[in-house]
Image: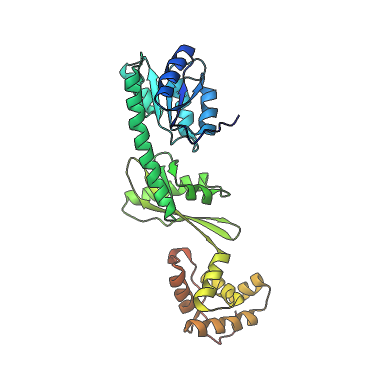
Amino acid sequence: MNFNIDPARGDVVLVVDDVPENLAVLHDALDESGYTVLVANNGATALQRAAEAQPDIILLDAVMPGMDGFETCRHLKASLATRHIPVVFMTGLTEAEHVVAAFAAGGNDYVAKPLRTSEVLARITSHMQTARLVVQARSALDAFGNAVIAMTPRDGKIVWQTPLARTLMQGYAVDTELTAWLAATQLAHSQGQSHPPLTLQRASRRLIFSAAEFSENEQWMIVLREESDSAQIEKLMASFKLTQRESEVLNWVIKGKTNRDIGDILGTSPRTVNKHLEHVFVKLGVETRTSAAAVAMGKLRIRTTEAASPVESPAGAPPR
């Protein structure tokens, strides 16, 4: 079932409670205050409706048969699709251990039963304002072309991500590699050392993860960027007025390939590759492969740690 929310209506609140009377009272109070109200009477239905309708906030009963509120909240926070939604627990369990359990499950706040409508509305307003500021900040990052994710170093979970980051990660298997890289980066950081970026390959495209901001206990900011051979070749052509084949040769020189390797890749002879390379040297105003690679990497802003050392060969040297 799909929930098509009328954009002209107010903010969307999902109320989760197994007692019909509680649902009715909250529904009427929220509806009168201008909110669009969705209801669920169990944890499984709440998870489905949260994922499909993307409410602005969830009011969640702590004690329900089957999947209780604590477990429901853990599922909500475990999913990238719903973890950003603020959760306010509704509970008559006001002992410290239950309050702690609510926050440990990922809840943002709690209100005690019997509910006071004015308090519930105040909590909703406060948490939705905070959530909007977070969304605006992430949208700003995305608008300026920044693909960013926030991760917790202790467990490698993605806390939030910009839409651009979500798009870039589609098609890449990131879970295992990203968790291992994060652990290695955290260890290096604790020793005052740096750790190289993570590069994942998919055909001719590469997704590169770089740690941008560290927080010992909370979240790490990871910046993503995607590179592709085709985009790199086009930029080389535009930057140095190279032909496509010259750009292809230079692209592989940057990767440290010999003329023989490049010939095998491009389906031509090493001598032909060398001829193309001579033209590249002239257009870049250099005499060696190393100089050509350095000039090209400077233009493409490729980190030296991400490119292999080119095999040296001056212009006119025998093809390799």
Q: Is residue 240 left or right of residue 185?
A: right
Given residues 165 and 289, the one toward you in this image is 165
Given residues 110 and 255, the one toward you in this image is 110
The spot of residue 147 in percent (x, y) is 45, 52
The extreme right residue here reads 267
The spot of residue 258 in percent (x, y) is 57, 74
Given residues 297 and 58, the one toward you in this image is 58
Tell me: residue 301, above or below residue 35.
below
The spot of residue 52 in percent (x, y) is 54, 33
Q: Is residue 201 left or right of residue 12?
A: right
State whether residue 29 appears in this view: yes
The extreme bottom residue here reads 316
Q: Residue at left 41%, top 43%?
A: 151
Q: State which quarter of the image contains the N terminus.
A: top right
**How many numbered marks, from 0 up?**
0
Tell me: residue 269, above or below residue 255.
below
State whether residue 153 appears in this view: no
Tell me: residue 274, above or below residue 300.
below
Q: Residue at left 35%, top 32%?
A: 127
Q: Residue at left 56%, top 31%?
A: 3
- In this picture the colour scheme is rainbow
Tell me: residue 46, above or below residue 143.
above
Q: State which quarter of the image contains the C terminus.
A: bottom right
Q: Quadrant of residue 98?
A: top left
The spot of residue 85 in percent (x, y) is 43, 33
